[in-house]
Image (cartoon, rainbow, N blue to C red):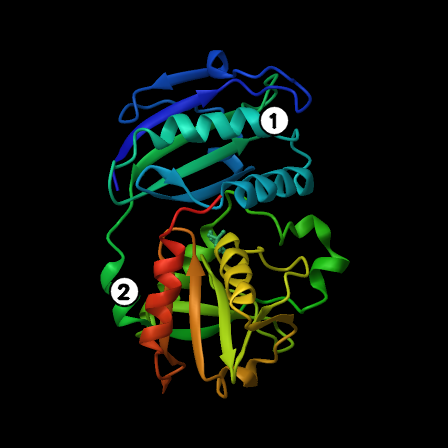
Amino acid sequence: MALSFALVIDPAASDDSRTDFAGTFRVIDATAPALSVGELSTQRGDGIFESVGVVDRHPQELIAHLDRLAHSASLCDLPVPNREQWRQAVFTAAEHCPEQGEGVIKLMLSRGIEHGPTPTAWVTAARAPDNTGVRERGIRVVTLDRGYSIDTPARAPWLLLGAKTLSYAVNMAALREAKRRGADDAIFVSSDGFVLEAPTSSLVLKEGDRFVTPAPNGGILHGTTQLGLFDHLASLGHETAYETIPVGRLATADAAWLLSSVRLAVPIIAIDGAELTADRELTASFNQFLLSPRA
Ligand code: PLP
């Protein structure tokens, strides 16, 4: 996924009330080296990020992404991002996504250079990979122990479990383990047997006429795609719920999906080798909604 555009942001104070932040952006060559070797993002994974899906140059669910960026910043003791500045940076980057079709914009905020004066902030744009096949085909998943209990986030907030940090090595290792086990993706389970999330997506189950997702109680990210889909389902009169879900309920769900900003809704067709029927019609309607312009 080659980057098509990148800009560095001179971080502004969160209460900077100017209306035009263009002067705080510096466009850089997206194909050339740009970060200092002293960067704490690369040395320690010390920073946060967001991946925003873009459709026909429209950044999707931007309000929810900026909310989560601010939440991650606060959990990590990083300066609160100036919302309007980041919003304008995203719209500038969106102009460099495909005019038609899907793109991805990444927002990064790191603690900056060791002993340096400011955080480092940058935004990139690229064409999104083609996910149309996997949205129809579906994915096979395995459950993997996440190694902490459901009450760990409350007992150990310094683990930053609810922040979208740049430290994704564990998430990538889980995906490799899933592949080694012959699956496409994983569902993390707490050590005391509750369903959490996937390494790069949220889980939604359909049980009868209800749609349920694990409660974002600090141990998982609150997915912007799941949030948007639940609002949509509620507006259509469906019941939606956040619950603490024992792993055994995966086996009795009528249908299940992984949801994320770029891949969108993919149906789960097997969990730990047990086949699950994909609801193709519902999946298509989810993705039709998720590909429509959303604030
Ligand atoms: N959970 C994790 C760990 C993720 O990395 C992601 C996506 O980045 C999600 C959930 C889904 O979040 P979103 O729908 O905002 O992409």
> Pointer 2: residues within 10 angstroms few (<14), some, or many (20+)?
some
Label 1 element class: loop
Q: Quadrant of residue 239?
A: bottom right
Instruction: Please tell me which residue is depicted at 51% across the width and 67% down the height of the picture.
Output: 236
Q: Give me the C-alpha separation between circle 1 and circle 2.
A: 36 Å
Tell which residue pokes out farthest to the right in this image: 155
- Do the residues under discs 1 and 2 have CB atoms within 8 angstroms? no
- Residue 202 image label: none
Instruction: Please tell me which residue is depicted at 55% across the width and 57% down the height of the picture.
Output: 227
Whether residue 51 is visible here, answered yes or no, is yes
Q: Is residue 247 above or below residue 113?
A: below
Instruction: Please tell me which residue is depicted at 41% across the width and 81% down the height of the picture.
Output: 272
- Residue 82 image label: 1
Q: Which of marks 1 and 2 is nearer the N terminus?
A: 1
Camera-side residue: 236 or 19?
236
Q: Quadrant of residue 60?
A: top left
Instruction: Please tell me which residue is depicted at 47% across the width and 49% down the height of the picture.
Output: 168
Q: Where is residue 13 in the image (x, y as percent from the top left)?
A: 65, 20
Given the image, on which type of amino acid does mark 2 rest?
Val
Q: Position of residue 157 (x, y in %)?
A: 72, 52
Residue on which disc 2 sits: 134
